[in-house]
Image (spheres, rainbow, N blue to C red):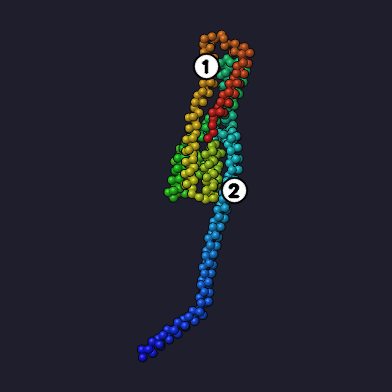
Amino acid sequence: MFGIDTTVLLFVILAGTCAGAITYALLFNRMSAEKQVGKRLESIKAAESDRAVVKAAREKINEAAKRRKSLQDTLKDLDEKQKTSTRTIKNPPLRIQIRQAGLNMAVERFYIYSAACGIALALVVFIVGAPLFAVPAAALVGGLGLPRWFISFCRKRRVKAFLNEFPNALDVIVRAVKSGLPLNDGIRLIASESAEPVKSEFRRIVDAQQMGLSIPDAALRMPETMPCPEAGFFGIVIQIQAQAGGNLSEALGNLSRVLRDRKKMKAKVQALSMEAKASAAIIGALPFIVAFLVYLTSPNYLMPLFVTSTGHLILGVSAIWMSLGIFVMRRMMNIEV
């Protein structure tokens, strides 16, 4: 009995093993085919994922290229406008010079004041007893030189005051933008709370906006009344941010930092050039000092220069050469930053 059961058991095991081997042999090709199909599906999914990544990267590159091209076009347009504005700033008409000086005066009134100044200076020179040829020269200097020098002096003083306050105004705008206020409110805040002449310049931007002009266009017009590169920088930053987008507070903060660095560099250059300016002042004043000392010791030695025609000619030529020397030294010492 035991032997029969063992034989039957071995037969069953052998039959099951044969059946399993036959089944595996029959299903091997199908299983390998399924594995290949699975691998192919995984490769297709990976390829699709790679294509999606490549497509996203390509779209990102195309978007960056479009934005770069838009920024380049914007910068090109702004460069053209800046060149035109720079030509206007360097040689502005008299009407614009008066506005840039902060004077509320018509051109006709300026001409009247210039004529009165020329007549007054000519009368003073005539009453003092100067030679007759000095009277028309004094009238020319008083009518054309002094009034325009006064306008230039007022322009430089106004630009200097503007540059001292402008970085602080930009910092206020940056804080306003970071706190959630729009740019319009920041500009209105400067137009009402800042010191002159920054207050007047931003008031013009607010007035232009109320007349229908956009803030970037109004900011680009600031150099017309404030002849300095810093005002042009502000307009360019606002224009680029409006057309190309970006972080406005960061851009204005960088501009404020650049303006402060420019101011420090100008102060450093001025400090380094003070020695040359002092030397130039001593050299320019030395002939007059020596002539005065010689006049005190020997008056008759210098009098022929003032009472003879040859002396007048020598004085005129000397004045021309002195003026050329002072002009050259001034050009050498004035370093633009």
**Residue 133 falls in which quadrant of the image?**
top right
Quadrant where the image shows the N terminus: bottom left
**What residue does disc 1 label?**
289
**Residue 298 falls in which quadrant of the image?**
top right
Q: What's the distance in space between the residues labelled 2 and 1, CA to CA?
A: 60 Å
Residue 272's spot in the image, x, y percent? 49, 29
Q: Is residue 175 above or below residue 3?
A: above
Q: Nearer the viewer, residue 285 or 93?
A: 285
Secondary structure of the residue carrying tag 1 is: helix
Q: Is residue 149 visible?
A: no
The three-letter amino acid code for the residue at tag 2 is: Asp
Residue ranking furthest to the front: 3
The residue positioned 43% from the left and 45% from the top of the image is 175
Upstream in the sequence, badge 2 or badge 1? Answer: 2
Residue 32's spot in the image, x, y percent? 52, 74
The residue positioned 52% from the left and 63% from the top of the image is 49
Q: Is residue 249 above or below residue 311?
A: below
Residue 207's spot in the image, x, y percent? 52, 44
Residue 274's spot in the image, x, y percent? 49, 27
